[in-house]
Image (cartoon, grey):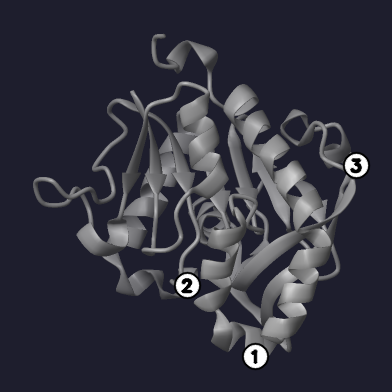
């Protein structure tokens, strides 16, 4: 069985999260639904048609918007796949666009932010977040990296808010047993962060952040961010995905 990574742009790969899952012995398959649609042609990987032999889903960010879902058949199918995986209590982890797709698929509301968020912003753990296993070892207050123009405005019914801030009310939330949504990008190493920022220049302008200011933020916060991001990735690999589904040694 394989963990399916749904990647939505050439540069927006799974970064440290993908590496951590592989290092922990999981079979990982990366799909490009934005290029290959549903199923895809032979040799091309689009959105899986079903959850047969699927261990769980990692839904990455991308330049697309959930408010444009009606224009993309593959995104509609991806939302249905998230809903089905959640119903089966398979692990589902969403980052940025993936967070928003989880929110949409499970009945929440997604809409544009007042202005995009690009760069490092402070977040704080909620009371439930302070005791959430997936956030074990993560400081209750920290600076993390955002690059988003939309957000989950209303959480799905039954969701638990784990992290928040005045800049991102729903920074991270949990629905059910193994569905986790993160509005921020914890998967980035520094080259990936630079690539995402390079493709977000229009949003940077709208956010009022210059390239120079972003570099200063990165110099100031990256070391702590990387340490906490690594811890989060290990927590996801350890606590979210059942040990019995790992590859044999």
Tell me how far mark 1 sits from mark 2, CA to CA.
Answer: 18 Å
Which quadrant of the structure image shows residue 132? Answer: top right
Q: Which residue is mark 1?
A: 205
- As rendered, which of 87 and 222 lies closer to the eye? 222
Taking depth in this image into account, of 48 and 215 the one nearest to the observer is 215
Mark with earlier residue (1, 2): 2
- Mark 1 or mark 3, earlier in chain: 3
Circle 3 residue: 127
Residue at left 70%, top 47%? 173
In the rendering, at what x and y percent does residue 159 appear? 69, 45
Judge by depth and name the residue closer to the eye, 197 or 57: 197
**Residue tagged by mark 2?**
65
- Answer with left or right where residue 59 lies relative to residue 202: left
Between the residue at mark 1 and the residue at mark 3, the CA separation in whole angstroms equals: 34 Å
Q: Secondary structure at mark 3?
A: helix
Position in image of residue 219 (x %, y %): 78, 66
- Per the image, label 1 sits on a secondary structure element best described as helix
Q: Residue at x 77, y 81 (%)?
A: 213
Could you give the CA–CA distance between mark 3 and mark 2, rounded to whole angstroms?
Answer: 30 Å
Whether label 1 touches label 2, CB < 8 Å:
no
Q: Is residue 108 visible?
A: yes
């Amino acid at each position: 069985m394989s963990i399916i990574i749904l990647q939505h742009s050439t540069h927006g790969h799974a970064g440290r999260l993908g590496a951590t899952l592989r290092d922990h012995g999981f079979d990982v398959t990366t799909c490009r639904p934005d290029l290959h649609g549903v199923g895809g042609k032979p040799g091309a990987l689009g959105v899986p048609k079903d959850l047969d032999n699927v261990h769980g889903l990692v839904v990455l960010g991308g330049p697309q918007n959930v408010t444009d879902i009606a224009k993309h058949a593959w995104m509609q199918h991806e939302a249905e796949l998230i809903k089905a995986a959640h119903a089966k209590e398979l692990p589902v982890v969403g980052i940025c666009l993936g967070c928003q797709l989880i929110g949409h698929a499970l009945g929440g509301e997604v809409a544009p932010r007042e202005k995009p968020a690009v760069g490092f912003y402070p977040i704080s753990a909620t009371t439930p977040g302070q005791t959430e296993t997936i956030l074990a070892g993560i400081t209750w207050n920290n600076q993390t990296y955002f690059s988003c123009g939309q957000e989950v405005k209303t959480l799905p019914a039954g969701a638990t808010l784990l992290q928040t801030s005045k800049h991102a009310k729903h920074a991270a939330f949990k629905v059910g047993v193994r569905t986790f949504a993160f509005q921020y990008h914890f998967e980035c190493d520094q080259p990936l962060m630079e690539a995402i920022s390079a493709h977000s220049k229009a949003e940077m302008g709208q956010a009022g952040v210059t390239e120079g200011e972003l570099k200063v933020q990165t110099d100031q916060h990256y070391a702590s961010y990387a340490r906490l991001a690594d811890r989060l990735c290990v927590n996801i690999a350890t606590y979210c995905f059942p040990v019995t589904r790992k590859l044999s040694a």
